[in-house]
Image: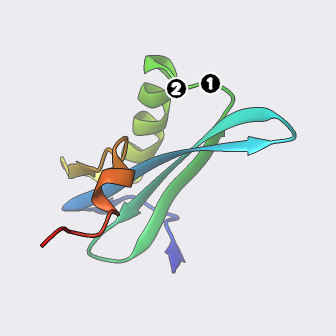
Amino acid sequence: MNIASERKVRRFIAVDETCVNVNGEQYWVYSALDVDRNELISMRVYPTRNFLTSESFFKSVLKYCEGKPEFIVLILQNIHILLQPSKG
């Protein structure tokens, strides 16, 4: 996987956030990937999750983008439902 180092025209950016526990403390890991290039644009760790941290992350991602890319955000709050075997 490549890591972004310059501004480029990007069509689609996949964004993910994950909560991790380290020594009893919660941290939020945000990552953004250029879907067409399979290129990591940004990865950041924050001690909290709120509007300001999300805004800060998206602004940092846009520094590596020309134009207006579409963001793809998958919310996995109910991932346990998706992973259950289907009935039938």
Across and down, in percent, residue 40 comes to 48, 66
Question: Tag count in the figure?
Answer: 2
Relative to 60, residue 35 above or below:
below
Quadrant in which the C terminus appears: bottom left
Across and down, in percent, residue 29 comes to 59, 45
Relative to 42, residue 88 above or below:
below
Q: CA distance from mark 1 to mark 2?
A: 7 Å
Across and down, in percent, residue 44 comes to 60, 45
The amino acid pointed to by label 1 is Thr
Residue 21 is tagged as: none
Q: Which residue is mark 1?
A: 48
In depth, the one of 21 and 15 nearer the eye is: 21
Mark 1 closeness class: few <14, some 14–19, many ≥20 residues within 10 Å:
some
Q: Is residue 16 left or right of residue 84?
A: right
In depth, the one of 16 and 32 nearer the eye is: 16
Residue 53 is tagged as: 2
Q: State the residue at coordinates (43%, 19%).
A: 51
Mark 2 closeness class: few <14, some 14–19, many ≥20 residues within 10 Å:
some
Q: State the residue at coordinates (87%, 40%).
A: 23
Q: State the residue at coordinates (68%, 36%).
A: 27
**Marks 1 and 2, the one that precedes in the sequence:** 1
In depth, the one of 38 and 83 nearer the eye is: 83
Q: Secondary structure at mark 2?
A: helix
